[in-house]
C-alpha cells in the first residue's frame, strides 16, 4: 500500500470515527437526556438501563470500533505530517491513540455489566449498579487527559511540519485545552455539567469533530507517490546516460 493510500484510508477511518460517535446519540435518546446523569436516584439508573439495554450494547460496539479506527487515523496523521517514526511527537500521538482504545474497552466492559438483568431486576443490586456506573464515569473522564495529549501533540506537530493548514493546529490546541480542563467534570456531583449530561460530553465530541475535519483535509492532500519516485527515477536516468 502506497503512502498516499495509507493516508487516505486513515482519513476515511477518522470520518467513520465521527459517524460512529454520532450514532451513539441515536441509540438511547430520550428527549435531551441520553444517559443517566449523576444525581439521579438508584431507581432512575436501573430504569434507564432497563429501557435502553439494547441501545447500551450498540453504544459499546460502535465506540469500540470507532476507537480502533482512531488508531488507524493516528498512524496516518503522523505520515501526513512526515513525522519521523521515532520522534517524541509521533510516539505521543500513536501511544495516546492506543491508550484511548484500551481505556474505552475497559469503560465499555463495565458499562455492559450494568446492563445485565441481574443488576436491573433486583433492587438490592441497584447500589452496585450505580457503583459500576460511577467507575465507568471516572475512567471515561480520566481518559480526557489522554485525548488532550493527543490533540496537543498534534498541534505541535502541525506547527512544526507545516504539512497541513495552520487552522488545523490552532483548533487542535484549543480543543486540547478544553479537553484537558474537561477532566474535572468527573468531580461535579449534580447540575447541568454533571457527568453524562449533554454539555459534559462536549469535550469528547470536540475531539471527534476535529479528527473528522482534519481527515477531510488529509483526503485533499496531493499525491506524494509520484514526487517521491522522481529523484530515484532521475538517478536511474543519469546512470543510464552515456
Image (cartoon, rainbow, N blue to C red):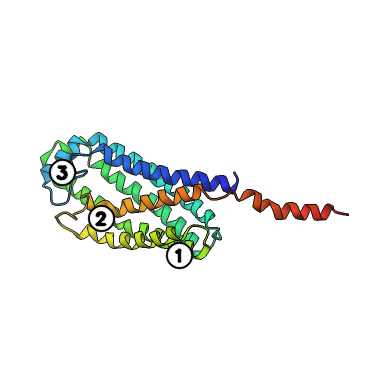
Q: Residue at x 52, y 62 (%)?
A: 162
- In front: label 2 or label 1: 1
Up-down relation of residue 2 to residue 186 (above or below) = above
Up-down relation of residue 241 to residue 26 (above or below) = below
Q: Quadrant of residue 172?
A: bottom left
User: Alpha-carbon distance for marks 2 and 3?
Assistant: 17 Å
User: Alpha-carbon distance for marks 2 and 1?
Assistant: 28 Å
Secondary element type, mark 3? helix
Label whose residue precedes the other's in the sequence (2 or 3)? 3
Q: Quadrant of the N terminus?
A: top right
Percent across and percent down for residue 5 are: 56, 44
Q: What residue would you read off at disc 2?
A: 138
User: Alpha-carbon distance for marks 3 and 1?
Assistant: 42 Å
Q: Would residue 119 be seen by someone viewing this image from the given angle?
A: no
- Judged from this view, the residue extending furthest toward the right is 242
Q: Are marks 3 and 1 in contact (CB under 8 Å)?
A: no
Percent across and percent down for residue 68 are: 42, 45
Secondary element type, mark 2? helix
Q: Quadrant of the C terminus?
A: bottom right
Mark 1 Cα within 10 Å, few/some/many (few <14, many 20+)?
some
Q: Are marks 2 and 1 in contact (CB under 8 Å)?
A: no
Q: Which mark is residue 45?
A: 3
Q: What residue would you read off at disc 1?
A: 156
Q: Residue at x 15, y 43 (%)?
A: 45
Q: Residue at x 71, y 55 (%)?
A: 231
Percent across and percent down for residue 190 are: 14, 55
Amino acid at each position: 500500500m502506497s503512502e498516499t493510500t495509507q493516508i487516505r484510508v486513515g482519513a476515511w477511518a477518522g470520518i467513520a470515527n465521527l459517524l460512529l460517535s454520532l450514532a451513539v446519540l441515536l441509540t438511547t435518546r430520550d428527549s435531551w437526556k441520553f444517559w443517566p446523569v449523576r444525581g439521579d436516584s438508584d431507581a432512575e439508573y436501573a430504569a434507564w438501563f432497563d429501557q435502553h439495554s439494547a441501545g447500551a450494547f450498540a453504544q459499546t460496539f460502535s465506540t469500540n470500533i470507532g476507537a480502533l479506527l482512531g488508531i488507524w487515523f493516528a498512524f496516518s496523521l503522523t505520515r501526513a505530517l512526515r513525522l519521523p517514526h521515532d520522534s517524541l511527537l509521533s510516539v505521543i500521538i500513536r501511544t495516546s491513540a492506543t491508550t484511548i482504545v484500551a481505556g474505552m474497552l475497559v469503560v465499555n466492559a463495565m458499562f455492559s455489566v450494568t446492563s445485565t438483568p441481574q443488576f436491573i431486576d433486583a433492587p438490592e443490586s441497584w447500589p452496585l449498579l450505580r457503583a459500576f456506573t460511577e467507575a465507568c464515569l471516572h475512567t471515561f473522564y480520566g481518559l480526557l487527559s489522554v485525548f488532550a495529549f493527543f490533540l496537543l501533540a498534534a498541534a505541535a506537530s502541525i506547527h512544526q511540519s507545516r504539512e497541513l493548514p495552520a487552522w488545523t493546529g490552532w483548533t487542535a490546541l484549543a480543543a486540547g485545552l478544553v479537553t484537558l480542563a474537561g477532566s474535572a467534570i468527573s468531580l461535579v456531583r449534580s447540575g447541568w455539567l454533571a457527568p453524562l449530561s449533554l454539555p459534559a460530553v462536549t469535550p469528547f465530541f470536540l475531539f471527534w469533530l476535529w479528527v473528522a475535519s482534519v481527515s477531510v483535509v488529509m483526503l485533499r492532500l496531493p499525491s506524494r507517490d509520484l514526487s517521491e519516485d522522481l529523484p530515484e527515477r532521475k538517478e536511474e536516468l543519469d546512470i543510464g546516460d552515456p
